[in-house]
Image (cartoon, rainbow, N blue to C red):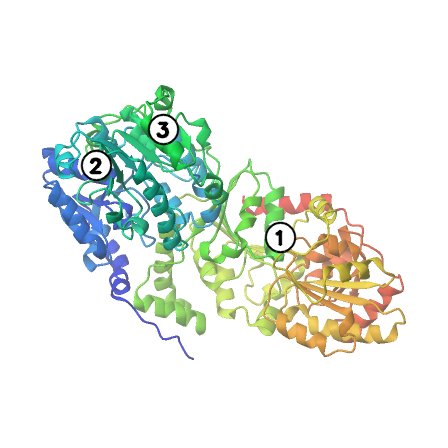
Amino acid sequence: MKLKKRHFSKNYLNKSKYLKHIENTVIDDHMIVLESQKGANLHGNIFYILKELLCNEEYADYKIYVSVTKNNADKFRILLNQYNLSTNLLIMGTAQYYKIISQTKYIILDTSHEAFFIKKEGQVILNVWHGTPLKTLGKKDYSGMHTLGNVQKSFFIADFLLYPSEYMMKHMIEDYMLNNIAEGVCLLGGYPRNEAFLNDVNPEIVETLQLSGKEVIGYMPTWRGSVGKVDRSIQIIHISHYLLELDKSLTENQVLLVNLHPFIGDALNFEMFKNIIPFPKEYETYDVLNVCDQLITDYSSVFFDFAITKRKILLFAYDESEYLTDRGLYIQLDELPFPVLKTVPELIDAINEPKGYDESEFLKTFASYENKEASSTLLERIILGKKMKVELPIPNNGKQNVLIYSGGLAKNGITTALFNLLNEIDVNKYNYYLTFAAKAVVKHKDILLNLPKGVCYIPTVEKMNAGVCDKFLIVLTKKIKFNVDYDRKILDRIYQYEIKRTFGNIKFSNVVQYSGYEMKKQMLFGRFMCNKIIYVHNNMVSEINVRGAQKPNMLRYAYNSYDKIALVTEDMREPTLEFCNNESKFFVANNIIDYNKIIEMSTKQFSYDEDTISTLEIEELEKILKSESRVFINIGRFSPEKGHFRLIDAFEKVYSEEENKPYLIILGGHGVLYNETLEYAVGKNCKDNIIIIKSMSNPFPLLKKCDYFVLSSLHEGFGLVLAEADILGLPVMSTDILGPKLFMEKHGGLLVEESLEGIVLGMKKMMLGEIKPLGVDYELMNKTSVKQFEDMLL
């Protein structure tokens, strides 16, 4: 047995001891850790909270730490020294960092925890976030809707969530789907950083920047791009162009103070400007912004804060249409009281004109809680237990929560069956949450847009906390025989912590490992302390023999650890007994067939997708479908168990005997044998009549135009596409295998010997007109399937 060679960084080795710290350290009631922007920047709410902690004698006995990345430590020191503040900098990734995080009583942060973090019993977490959102967040942010899990987790494990307005509270709870899973208290109160605007201007900043007697204009644009996908050079060119144009139009008594995102600002040469200077880095951002007489911004949340000064705000949205292509807004710019400018001449005119709008209604909605004592009031609540004026619980409907693991949401039968189920079940009976690994659904995230109303989701970040020895054990468990007696306690410990890392203390009444595959997920969901259900979508004995996709030891562990085993067809009972002989755990949970959707989608225009790969142009394929020639179709991934090579051989025999030559279409979404299938077909005499298509988001218009459907598989779960073809009126046939067998026998379908000869015989019967559609009552079938599923949740 060969194991991959692994390299462990110093940070990983330090983090590998985190679980031991959790077990061995004692909570220190007088320890506080503050974290601003994941240790990258100390400006904003956390700075003002820190300042209150260090300057208020009430907290003199507390040990205070500020998390910081190693690269930003000097920047933090400069800022702290400027304000004569002295505290402990906690370098993230060090051994000390993981130990302190495991024993501190209070954690105050403005973004999200690092993915490793597990909330320890007794810890108190306050999340103040970093601004009122204008841009859509969470599930409404298309670019990142599948990666919201770590931020979402940071919210649902928080004891307190600070919101400066009901508007913000509503959107954050709704778009991070916190209802019914988060138990924290929403505190409606002023933002600590806005204290700067309610106090006098800092004279040191005015003197240092020589701003006395000048009209000061602040410019704070938002960042264009997403993490890992930003063309800095292009943005620098654009911003330089606009600033040069502005610089020419400013008078000698005007100064433009610019604060750009670090990705951009650090690379911009300000020496080219006469009247434009950057925000000084040694001062806190809002302290600097408070010297400004007016503010220019765009889609940044800063205007929600600056508005309390009642000074002029201008929105320079030169790229509004382009920017909003990738990102939505909660409020359209023309709904705000502030002028929206698209060109520099328009902006210059607005700068020099008197303020011509009234923001009073805006302030009532977005800033009614702002006050000079925001930091002190907040700390008194968190540390001293003094109630704030407005505290609201996160809504909870009292229904039980059901967690369903979906797998990677690839275009396959399991995903289709899952979404059919979600569309049919009564979401008013339970709260349903889908979960998946964020990185696994990148290519399939669009499917989240089709989730039925009332179904939420919790993405996970795959960074399991485990020591070197623990990870080695997990690898061994996957590679070799599972030693239940010796290893179970160790693996129980690892996976119990993984549940807490990923889902905190959410109370689930049921967890459903719907995918049925993936060793780590089989292990993880088998350790929840609630009703545990695992699905069997396929003949796992054949899966092992044909694909090697499962480990017998893992299946034995999984099926014996779960409370219920859901068989998608009664046919799966016999092979499943190979891994679990306790039949009292077996429940039949037939797939739901969304027949109305299939019929509706079949009426759409037949077309290829942008990523469709076909051996035949669509125009030529349409000619064939309209011709007198008969067309067989098979739909299934390019995988060994689908029997595509044998199907091609069978078709070649039928082709050679027919005067009016038929066609065969093989349509698959993904699979390891795509290239091999192409090569195999090319080697046949009937190659011109074999059409191989890879990836179609809507195959039903094509399926409907074909004459016969052939399931040629070596093994299957249910064979959902058999029902789909039947719904569209096609005669169907299947090899006589477990999975489709019971369904076809019950409804008088054609089962043929699981061999080349059997498939040939079946195809000939079809062409002779001997096989008719099944005529299944799918509405009744679906009602029965819904009841089967819900019965397992009881």
Q: Nearer the viewer, residue 505 or 154?
A: 154
Q: Is label 1 in contact with label 3 (beta carbons under 8 Å)?
A: no
The numbered dot on residue 350 is: 3
**What type is the residue that disc 1 sits on?**
Thr
Q: Bin the neighbour count of mark 2 within 10 Å (Cα to Cα): few under 14, some 14-19, many 20 and up.
A: many
- In front here: 597 or 182? 597
Mark 1 surroundings: few (<14), some (14-19) or many (≥20) residues within 10 A: some
Specify the quadrant of the image occupied by residue 251: top left
- Location of the C terminus (image quadrant): top right
Given this view, does label 1 or label 2 mark the residue nearer the observer? 2
Q: Which image quarter: residue 721? A: bottom right
Residue 382: x and y in percent read: 23, 34
- Name the quadrant of the N terminus: bottom left
Left or right: where 741 falls relative to 412: right
**Badge 2 amino acid:** Val
Label 3, label 2: how many angstroms apart (C-alpha)?
22 Å
Residue 396 is situated, as x and y percent measured from the top left of the image, at 43, 33
**Residue 288 numbered mark, or none:** 2
Which badge, 3 or 2, is on the more N-terminal residue?
A: 2
Q: Given contact means CB atoms under 8 Å apart, are the residues at marks 3 and 2 in contact?
A: no
Disc sitting over residue 416 in the figure: 1
